[in-house]
Image (tube, helix red, strand yellow):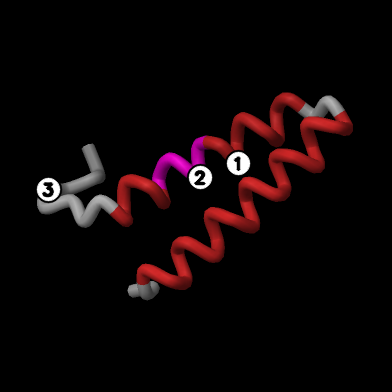
Amino acid sequence: MRSEDQIKRMMIQLEQMVQRLDKAHNENEINEIKAKIEILEWVLDAPAGKYHA
């Protein structure tokens, strides 16, 4: 399991990637990275339930 700081650093890196890709107009990769960011945000919220369907 990753620490909260590791997750926050990963989110920052992904957000920086989105900014670079936005300049290159790569919409597919941007959407994939944004989905990863959403998952990391969910993890930081410390959910109690299962995340698999």
Please, what is the three-letter code of the amino acid marked with disc 1? Answer: Ile
Secondary structure at numbered mark 2: helix
Query: What is the crowding at mark 1: few (fewer than 14 residues within 10 Å), some, or many (at least 20)?
Result: some
- The amino acid marked with disc number 2 is Lys
> Which of the two labelled residues, at mark 1 and mark 3, occupies the earlier sequence position?
1
Q: Where does label 1 land, which residue?
A: 33
x and y percentages locating residue 42 in the rendered image: 32, 46
Up-down relation of residue 14 to residue 27 (above or below):
below
Disc 3 crowd rating (10 Å Cα; few below 14, some 14-19, many 20+) is: few
Identified at 18% across, 51% down, the residue is 47
- Residue range highlighted in magenta: 35-39
Tell me, for residue 42, which label it has, or none: none
Q: Which residue is mark 3?
A: 49
User: In the figure, 11 relative to 18: above or below?
Assistant: below
- Could you tell me how far apart the alpha carbons at marks 1 and 2 are, in whole angstroms? 5 Å
Quadrant in which residue 13 is drawn: bottom right
Q: Are marks 1 and 2 in contact (CB under 8 Å)?
A: yes
